[in-house]
Structure formats: C-alpha cells, structure tokens
Image (cartoon, rainbow, N blue to C red):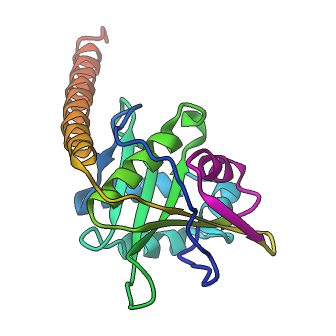
Amino acid sequence: MQNKLSSSLGPSAAPLIASSLSGPPVRELHGGHRAAILKHFLRLNAEDRRLRFGVPTADAVIRQYVKKLDFNQDAVFGIFDLNLALVAIAHLAYLPADKKRSRATEFGVSVLPKSRYKGFGSALLERAMVHARNTGVITLFVHCLAQNKVMMHLAKKSGMQIDYAFGEADACLKLPPANPSTILAEAVNVQLADFDFAIKSNLNQSNKTIRWLLKKNKPQ
C-alpha cells in the first residue's frame, strides 16, 4: 500500500473495535530488525509486491523503503516463525497533523505465502489499532489496490468505510480514545511477544547445537 491519502475520505460513523488482543503474539520491531524486515519484503513475489505497495516494486526500491523506515516516528509490527524469520509485517505510518485533520495513521501489511490464512493479518491490524488508540490517533487509513482481496476483507471485517475509484480503494476507521483495557492489552501483548520470541530463540539455538553435534559425530 502506498502512503497516499484521499482528501475526500471521511471516517466511518460507528466502528466496532476490540479492546483486547487475541491470536498470535505480535512483536513491535525496531532498528535492529531492519535486516529481517528487508529479507521479508525481498521474499515477496512480483504480484505480492504490487499488491503491498500499489505498484510493481523492484529490489532497489524495497531496499530504500526499508532503509528509510523511521522507528521513532512510525510503528512496525511483526510475527516471527520458529526459525525467527519475519513471516508477517505491518507498518503503521503516522501522517502529519494539521489544523484541519485529526491525528491519523496509515496501515500497510504483508504476509508471506506459507503463513497466510492463519489470522496473522487480522492479528497485526488488531495490534496496530490498539497501539494507534494508545498513542492518541483519531483515524486509521488504508490505501490499496481494489484487487487486494485480503486487505479489503480485513478492512470490511474491522468496520472500515471503503471508497473505490480508478481501481484503487481508500478505507478509514474512526478510533475511540484509549482506555485502561487498551493500555493493559498492549502491555500484556508486549510481554507475551517478548516471551514468545525468547522461547523461539532458545529453540532455534538448541536446534543449531543439535545439528552441529550430529554433524560432528557423524561417521566419516
């Protein structure tokens, strides 16, 4: 999805947003994850890249996109597999605020083919919405190609208002203010995600050690 905002887009009137998080642990990413993020995007095929970024996207463009990610300004979330590879990533880009527009963010997501249909996209959107509420965001936007059926499904499922024009879709959702349950939900998810990552790291290291021992002790 591109960082593009339709000026005529209005927020939905009565969204229903969960105040608690469910599904797989979603970890907030930082600059130390930049290499893993780049590897994730480079693993997307040509069609997946077109749907994610809105246009055909070469490796060089993806490298520049990842290089320019500002983890202090925006929020990036990810789901790791047992091999500590990022199989799903969401980018919550904070849009500049002015007198005419409330604080807003734009949501973009990608999931590797082998990890689809497991609820990862929904988990990332839910995590992003809670984080957005807790950071004072009023409106969450999505801009993507109308052909992006997965993103359209997520947008409709979350109650977003969707406008279509020239093969593209703009969706928006007005977010209610943060409350104690959203703050608690995010805090709990942070702890669960850190614990999940620690377990996977230990398992990954143990598997490497076992493979090394087996190889070392293999009869010549």
Q: Can see residue 26?
A: yes
Residue at image position (60%, 33%) is: 117
**In front of the other: 53 or 57:** 53
**Quarter of the image that includes the N terminus:** bottom right
**In front of the other: 112 or 106:** 106
Location of residue 2 by image quarter: bottom right
**In front of the other: 193 or 55:** 193
Is 128 left, or right, of 53 in this rendering?
left
Residue 154 percent coordinates (x, y): 60, 47
Is 138 left, or right, of 146 in this rendering?
left
Does the stretch in magenta take in 163? yes
Residue 22 percent coordinates (x, y): 39, 32
**In front of the other: 95 or 181:** 181
- Tally of numbered discs: 0
Is 114 left, or right, of 129 in this rendering?
right
**Quarter of the image that includes the C terminus:** top left
Residue 200 percent coordinates (x, y): 27, 29
Is residue 31 positioned above or below 194 on the image?
below
Residue at image position (70%, 55%) is: 148
Residue at image position (21%, 46%) is: 180
Does the stretch in magenta take in 194? no
Q: Can see residue 88?
A: no
The magenta segment is 145-164
Residue at image position (25%, 51%) is: 179
Is residue 160 positioned above or below 118 on the image?
below
